[in-house]
Every structure is written in structure tokens, then in C-alpha cells.
Amino acid sequence: MADETPAPDSPVIDTTVPHSARIWNYWLGGKDNYPVDRAAGDQYVDVFPGIVDIACSGRAFLARAVRFLAGEAGVRQFLDCGTGLPTADNTHEVAQRAAPASHIVYVDNDPLVLSHAQALLTSSAEGATSYVEADLHDPERILDLAATELDFGEPVALLLMGVLGHMGDHKEALGIVRHLGGALPSGGYLALYDDTDTDEAHNRAQRDYDDTGAVPYRLRPPEQIIAYFDDFDVVAPGVVPCEEWRPEPDQGGPPRRTSTLCGVGRKP
Ligand SMILES: C[S@@+](CC[C@H](N)C(=O)[O-])C[C@H]1O[C@@H](n2cnc3c(N)ncnc32)[C@H](O)[C@@H]1O
């Protein structure tokens, strides 16, 4: 459990309402969460147990996508928006294992993620990692801050993993993807996963969660998630459930089917 006594200069952590990063951490088996997060997480699981598979398969997709990007695609720069709390196989660890010179900029707006940023700022000697506290609703600020670290004249992979549902309005979410995607050069990549609204129990659990006072998460029709890739050439196997995206043999038993969609696209 997270230490609930803040240090004098630490960011203010609100432990009275559940937070997305902390509940995600709880479902992933982490310890950086509070009673309010565990209560909301358990209530969600009671209505829709599949959410734990979704969290795990999303994380596993993130690792496979970053391995593909740093390996086969040869990308050396990553802008990971909606990073989440540090866990196993964070973006910089996966990328720098494949390509030690990889440079990662993490972006999140949760104060607890900021207070744990130190764990994200380890880096290979050849590469670099940095953390920016910023809100995805303000993509121009993210680009301004990221431009001090990344060279947007060279390929950058934009990661939007499990975060676009926090952008309530689909038009706004699409606008954010276009804004950030527009800053990528030809040969840059977009990689994302998100939850669809195709499972009624999931929709019900999400409605209950949204009533807790937490920042709501919008489950979307598949076509709205597919539309995020409009300006990109989607690499094989296309926009598919997370567990179907280039599965690897060492993943254990057959993955359970989730109502997620994910994909990786290259900017032409
Ligand atoms: C569901 S978690 C996903 C974490 C991680 N990307 C993963 O795939 O495991 C969503 C993350 O988005 C962050 N987030 C939510 N709204 C945000 C916003 N407006 N700006 C930046 N980050 C945001 C949350 O703090 C949280 O860390």
C-alpha cells in the first residue's frame, strides 16, 4: 500500500476519490494504491471480472508494441502519454533492452505518478528518459515540453495506451490524436489500445465507476477507436483485440478474449 503520509514537499495526493493510475496499478497486482482505489476496483470486478484481463493484456500489448517499434521499426524516440504508475516492463525498459539509445518522454497528470517518476527516470547510459507532468487535454503544451527532449525531425512513436477514454468527447479525443500525430514526421508511429463498449457488463461496471467521482472513462464503439488511425498506415495484423496483436509464444496459456482494441500505425 502507498504510504499515506505525504512528505512536506510532495504533490498533494487525493485519497478520497479513486484515481485511474492507482486502480490500474491495483488490477495489475501493484501496491501503489489506496483503500478508495481498491474498493472501486473490487466493485468494478464484481460487475465485470474481465477488467483484470483487460489491464494485463493492455500492458502486455504495450510491451510487444514497444519491442516492435524499437526493434523491427527502428524507432529511437518515444512519447508515452498517460504513462501510469511504474510497473514491470515500463516503456523505457522494454525499448532500451531492444535499443539502448532509446529516448523516452513520459507524460501523465496524476500527482502520484509524478511522485513515483524517479522509478521511471532510470535509463541506459546511451539513452535517456524524462517525465513531464502535463494534461492530455493540452496537446500543444505536451509538444512544447517534449520538443526540449525529442527531435521531431526524426521518427517518434506516440503511445496512447489506455488513456483516450479519459477524453470524454470523441471529437476531442480524435482532435488530440490528430494534433499530436500531426507533429510526427513521416516514419513516426502511433500505438494505442483502448476499451470498446461491446460488452454490456463492462458498460455497467464503467457507469458505476464513473459515479464514484473519479475522472470518467468513456468506452467507445470500435469504429471510433479505428478512426484514431485515419492518418496512419496500420501495420499487420491491424486494429485487433490486444491479445491478438503479434502474440508471443512465452505468454503462458491461451489469453482470454478481451473487448479491447489496439493497433500500431506508421505515418506515411
Ligand atoms: C488506465 S491508465 C493506463 C496506464 C498505462 N498507459 C498502461 O497502459 O498501463 C490511464 C493513465 O492515464 C493517465 N491520465 C488520465 N487522464 C489524463 C490526462 N488528462 N492527461 C494525462 N494523463 C492522464 C492516468 O493518470 C493514468 O496513469
Image (cartoon, helix red, strand yellow):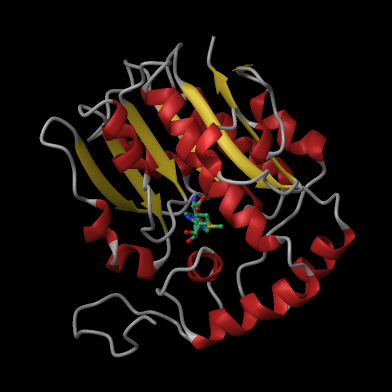
Q: Quadrant of residue 150?
A: top left
- Please indicate, yes or no, whether residue 16 appears anywhere in the rendered image: no
Q: Position of residue 227 (x, y in %)?
A: 73, 29
Q: Quadrant of residue 85?
A: bottom left
Residue positioned most to the bottom: 5
Left or right of 62, for residue 11: left
Viewer-side residue, 222 vs 47: 47
Residue sitting at x 57%, y 21%? 265
Specify the quadrant that holds the C terminus: top right
Above or below: residue 32 compared with residue 85:
below
Q: Estimate the x, y position of residue 154 in percent, counting from the top left.
A: 32, 16
Position of residue 8 measured from the top left corner of the image (x, y, whole percent): 19, 85
Taking the image as shown, residue 84 lies to the left or right of residue 205, namely: left
Residue 94 lies, in percent from the top left, at 35, 38
In the rendered structure, the answer to whether residue 158 lies left or right of residue 115 reads right
Seen at 38% across and 20% down, the residue is 71
